[in-house]
Image (cartoon, rainbow, N blue to C red):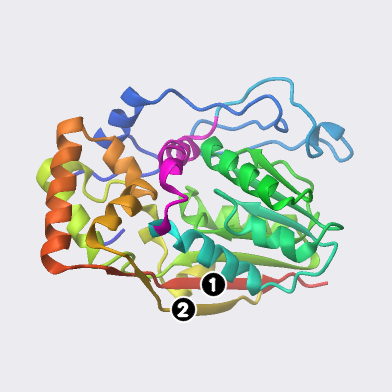
Amino acid sequence: MSGLVLVPTLTFAGVTTFERALRNRVEDVRLPGRINRIRQDRLGGNCQRGLPGDDRWQAGRPMEEDQPLSEPARRAARAYGAAADHYSLAALGFWDRFGGATVARLPLAAGDRVLDLCCGAGASAIPAARAVGPAGHVLGIDVAEPLLELARARAAREGLANIEFRYSDATCTGLPGGGFDAVVCVFGVFFAPDMPAFAAEMWRLVRPGGVLAITTWGPGLFEPANSCFWEAVGQAEPTLVRAFNPWDEITAPAALASLFPHAAEPAIVTAPGQHHLDRPDSFWDIVLGSGYRATIDALSRDQRDQVRQRLLGQLRSRNITTVRTDVIFGTAKRPE
């Protein structure tokens, strides 16, 4: 984050008013027993992998005990688990649009194996499953179980039997190295406390000759409505202004390129864009169906009502029905 900030902001390693408010509302999230064994420290998300050939590390095998998620993963799980109730609304159509656009840039072939990290409701995993066909396989991983439920339901409706969605910390899957023809992460890398380390872990999972794809937002996401939102939040609770907006941490092509390992030669493509709303009030659906939800859920009921009224008042008075959605696509092929 940049710029002068006069109040404490949330850092992935620290605790502020924002985090305390969320902790008062939501219990700790733990990995269910059906997931591979993961050992993590409290904040860093470090893990220890099983020995090669240990079948406990294979997909679908149970682990012996539940393990807590890292702190950054818990924050993401809370925010996007709550946002799941709005993910399918028309105003949130950008999730599918950019998930599909990321997959369309990959040289996927029938029979390929794809790993989608921070897969959400399947915006990129579903089109990947279509692309690799019945002989291929897609594994989607996310910490927001409500989003995974949406993804599983969608795959079932489409009759896709070649896709699996698993609840786990994407930064520490414990999966064997070099096991995937493509590893994808759309709008998820910025949730990691150490983005280069997360990108290196993704690279480890790509087979020689395979491809890594990381997609992030560009600058000015959802402007001009974004500024109206934070202004309304500031009037209700100043300590929450931009206290949770990790998507703004990496919005430049050079910054995305720097995440790829030195062995990679990433192709970086910027795609300026706009997202159209049927009416100004529809931006509230985006608020409740995106990372903004973390801020809303940290407010009291009265404060939430104040934010909504002030925000919609501004949007209506300016008749804002178009918001900025610039995207940066990064891809790199792992040397043979």
**Would you say 297 lies left or right of 269 here?**
left
| Residue of label 1 | 329
Q: Position of residue 115 (x, y in %)?
A: 70, 54
* Residue 231 shows in this picture: no
- Is 70 contained in the magenta span? yes
Q: Amino acid at mark 2?
A: Ala
Looking at the image, is mark 1 or mark 2 earlier in the sequence? Answer: 2
Q: Quadrant of residue 314?
A: bottom left
Does residue 298 lie above or below 24 as drawn?
Answer: below
Q: Are marks 1 and 2 in contact (CB under 8 Å)?
A: yes
- Residue at left offset 52%, top offset 37%: 146
Magenta-colored stretch includes residue 180: no
Look at the image and tell me in which quarter the C terminus lies.
Answer: bottom right
Q: Which residue is mark 2?
A: 271
Q: Using the image as rendered, state which of residue 245 and residue 208 is in the foreground.
A: 245
Compute the Cα span from label 1 to label 2: 8 Å
